[in-house]
Image: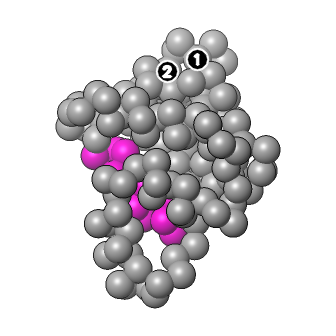
Amino acid sequence: MTDLRYTAFVGSLLAALPEIKRQHDALQKDIGPDVLPYPTVELVLEPFVKDLLRANADADLLRRVFLFLEEMAQAHDIDVVNLLHVGIFEPWAADPETLAHAWKYMGESSKQVASDAAHRLNRGANLPRASGR
């Protein structure tokens, strides 16, 4: 995997997960052609992943999604890690059901970022018990 950079994040995301291109195109139509990473993650990626988890469908796609999230968690660019923290894991910290479904697909780095997000929001009790925290 390549090291993700905030400045090239949207292109990397669309290359890794072309399934979200339609939603991203709709967002571009609504807010303009230069959609930044935060709205892309918060308004496209996060709901897409949450819907996949709720539908409990396409295990291969879920694995690809969570490999990408793990790559975000391991990025050397702290802005990419913060994007994951704020755009994905802060909302999930308040949603223990989504967090529990996601946990089994998450890698160790993703679990650490999710745990940090939950604890910073005083929602550590929402972490799956297997988190060890």
How far separated are the C-alphas under marks 1 and 2?
Answer: 6 Å
Q: Is residue 25 above or below residue 108?
A: below
Specify the label residue 103 is tagged with.
none
Q: How many marks?
A: 2
**7 drawn magenta:** no
Q: Toward the viewer: 103 or 117? A: 103
Where is residue 28? Give x, y as percent: 41, 80
Q: Secondary structure at mark 1?
A: helix
Identify the magenta region. 39-51
Q: Visible in this render: residue 91?
A: no
Q: Is residue 98 above or below residue 131?
A: below
Q: Are marks 1 and 2 in contact (CB under 8 Å)?
A: yes
Q: Quadrant of the N terminus?
A: top right
Give me the residue at 44% from left, 25% from top: 105
Give me the residue at 37% from left, 45% from top: 49
At label 1, counting other C-alpha atoms closer than 10 Å, the crowd grade (few under 14, some 14-19, many 20 or more) is few
Which residue does the numbered mark 2 point to in the structure image?
Answer: 128
Q: Is residue 36 above or below residue 111?
A: below
Q: Toward the viewer: 99 or 70? A: 70
Which residue does the numbered mark 1 point to in the structure image?
Answer: 131
* Residue type (three-letter) at the residue carrying disc 1: Ser
Q: Is residue 30 above or below residue 114?
A: below
Q: Visible in this render: residue 106?
A: yes
